[in-house]
Amino acid sequence: MHTVITKGQKEYPALLQELGDAPKQLYYKGTWNPKLFESCLAVVGTRRMTSYGRRVTEELVGEIASQGITIVSGFMYGIDATAHKAALRVGGKTIAVMPCGIDMIHPADQADLYKEVLDSGGLVISEYEGNFKPLLWTYPKRNRIVAGLSQATLVMEAGEKSGSLITANFAKKYKRKLFAVPGPLTSSVSVGIMQLIREGASVATGAKDVLDFYRSNSEFPLRFIPPAGGSPTRLQEIQSSPSSALEEKILEQLRREPLESDQLARMLEVGIAQLGAALSTMQLSGIITEESGKYHAH
Amino acid sequence: MLIKVPSATHFGLESLGVDVEINVANRGLPTFDIVGLPGQEVDESKERVRTAIANSSMEFPQKKITVNLAPADVPKEGSFYDLPIALGILASMLGFEVPAKSLFFGELSLDGSLRHTRGTLLLALFAREAGFKKLFVPKDSANEAAIVKGVEVFPVKDLEQLTLYLLKRETILPAVYKETASSLDSALAAEFDMAEILGQEKTKRAMEIAAAGGHNIIMVGSPGSGKTMLARALPGILPQLNEEESLEVTKIHSVTGLLRPGGALVRTRPFRSPHHTVSMIGLTGGGTKPSPGEITLSHRGVLFLDEFNEFPRQVLEVLRQPVEDGFVSISRSKERVRYPARFMLVASSNPCPCGYLNHTKKACSCTPREIQKYQKRVSGPILDRFDIHVEVPDVDVRELSQDAAASKFLETSLVIRARITRARETQRARFEKESFDSAQGRPIHTNAEMKNSHIKKFCVLAKETEQVLERAAVTFQLSARAYYKMIKVARTIADLEGTGAILPHHVAEALQYRWKQNISE
């Protein structure tokens, strides 16, 4: 079965068609649905995502995808994979653009995610056929498709020489909107972001900034799709409230910044045993979450 | 003239009586032969005996000497047959009687003096069991033999002294057991005191719980976070061995030669930390004559495996059965022995190959694939053996030393040890009766050793507590095994607090030390 759309066909995405260096053909897996391409957002970022990057990606992308915007990304580890997952979680649509032949899954250990993307009605596309192996030069080529398919590009976390900056440059070249999500100045994966902001990228401080752009652009009307059977996003989760003075104090600290239990114990001058019990209880009631040793308030 | 001198041989930690028969014949060419499956060391004994006698101002007989070690079909190894063989030759020459109900044991030096010989304690235990009354052992080994009551231990300096004693021209005073100073205080055994380590409150607490309940613990953290230092401080908070445990450990130390000359009962728990290049045999024990490995040497103590992920997978896999059973059976073509191996497993590992995953200051340079490969080096069944899992965060020492709260939380090892000792006593009382009617008849000492049947019996959860656990099982997706582990750890936390019932906050704290799956996911 050959599934390919060539440049010039009426199904070929309009946004891509207008580019000078548009791919001649697009191979795909899944069901080609032109509606998928109506309003797309490219979400790109580092492979070496921090826990901050993950949280922000999950929250922003979850909310944006739930509004019917298709999330386009490169199926890599880190921000890419998290963005695809966040879209799937809220029942949204997502497109994965591969740097390799259409019959390959790259990286291979994300086969589960691959299947999920297709099962949800999403698409996997590539300009290469068969089992063509990904090469150094195919990654930036792929990035032009990611940027080209989308009205806007959202960069989450990017190091100094991140591939996401290449995608960002394509977005600029194609005169598309570019959003950057600021991160802590101390983080090495904030360097690329700060550079983009200096160069004039719009700062996205929440899903609203991105959604406002799509809303104001009547060309890309927003269809409101309520999440069908998908689980609610973190923001919408029902939260219980802290039940003791200690829990309240913990929450107050964690709202300021995520902390390890040792740091909390010293700040609140509470024994580690008592603190540990409180933290577990709060986790069970869904007030806080833990990731790589640090606790986050919702 | 035929002389019989009683001695013994060891199989693992068991002993078997051996009769050393010495025949000095006037007829035949002057030769010196040993028969009865002697090993290399036993065969070399000929030269030591010959020279030792010559150097003890006596003459070695130019006669046909035949030594038989009976029973003849059991392989004999070790250097301790020197003394009985020399004694037999001297007795036949000088015509004195070998005293009845006496055992002789010891290695000779060429100058005729007796050297510290391994396995003396085992011999003394055998002597009492087999009804011997007197024991002649090297002076340096006499103290460990004197641990055993009911047998008179004679410390022998050299061959000449023993000969004069048996000719009734000199007296040897029986040894009186003395404790040595170093065997008494285990707090001195640790390299570091817990109070020397700033911060790491959670890991220290995890160590305390692990030590109190005998739980296996794994620490994951970046280089320099203090995992090794914390592990090395562990001996200082471990409770002293009780009499029964102490004897078990001393036996192992005696047979492997870890007991120094003049050594007494070992009171401190062993702490072993083999390098990750250790072989399978080195860890479990073995060899043609099976000798104890690291897991046996750490019996009733701690086996610390630093850089856990660097150990070859096959080497770690052999730990599975001993960790569950508390002993290891080694079968070789000629021998089958069983060594005790009830130890607390302490492991430390890096989170990824470069070590800086989730580090606050340094960036990790590993790809997700590398991280996954690294974490998969250790098999699931092995990780399942750990009750307590703790992530050790990196610390900024300069920052910590200015934090008043950090110093406020410091506790000395002695203070922590007092709490642990109390919790262990609670456990001993709990399992005292259980030792006899448990399924396999092996006594259990700690919460970590509880099987599911024990958990059902000793860890009855109140409705409220069970609700917390049920909820955790759903939220954290706990497996059935993890569920039971949480109960065991909660039991220990309650014991540390001195509470009979397991309350919700005990379970809640135990959940802090659960295995967090999909760390990299």
Image: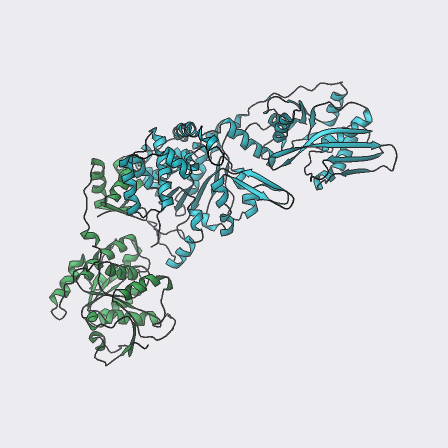
Give how far across and how far down residue A44 sits, in percent: 27, 63
Task: Tell me if residue B114 comes above or below residue B311 in the rendering.
Answer: above
- Chain A appears what colour? green
* Quadrant into which the C terminus of chain B falls: bottom left
Q: In this view of the protein, can residue B279 be seen by the observer? A: no
Task: Tell me if residue A99 comes above or below residue B447 in the rendering.
Answer: below
Q: Which chain is painted in cyan?
A: B
User: Is residue B283 or residue A265 the one in the foreground?
Assistant: B283
Give how far across and how far down residue A124 sits, in percent: 29, 69
Give how far across and how far down residue B91 sits, in percent: 79, 26
Image side of residue A251 versus residue B99, left or right? left
User: Is residue A160 or residue B366 the one in the foreground?
Assistant: B366
Give how far across and how far down residue B344 sits, in percent: 46, 38
Image side of residue A51 versus residue B66, left or right? left
Task: Tell me if residue B221 comes above or below residue A107 in the rendering.
Answer: above
Protein image colouring = by chain
* Quadrant into which the N terminus of chain B falls: top right
Q: Quadrant of residue B347?
A: top left
Q: In this view of the protein, can residue B335 be seen by the observer? A: yes
In the image, farthest residue toward the bottom? A8
Task: Tell me if residue A161 comes above or below residue A26 in the rendering.
Answer: above
Q: Quadrant of residue B405?
A: top left
Image side of residue B7 versus residue A20, left or right? right
Q: Residue at x 70, y 41 (%)?
A: B39
Q: Quadrant of residue B25?
A: top right
Q: Residue at x 54, y 39 (%)?
A: B296
Q: How many marks?
A: 0
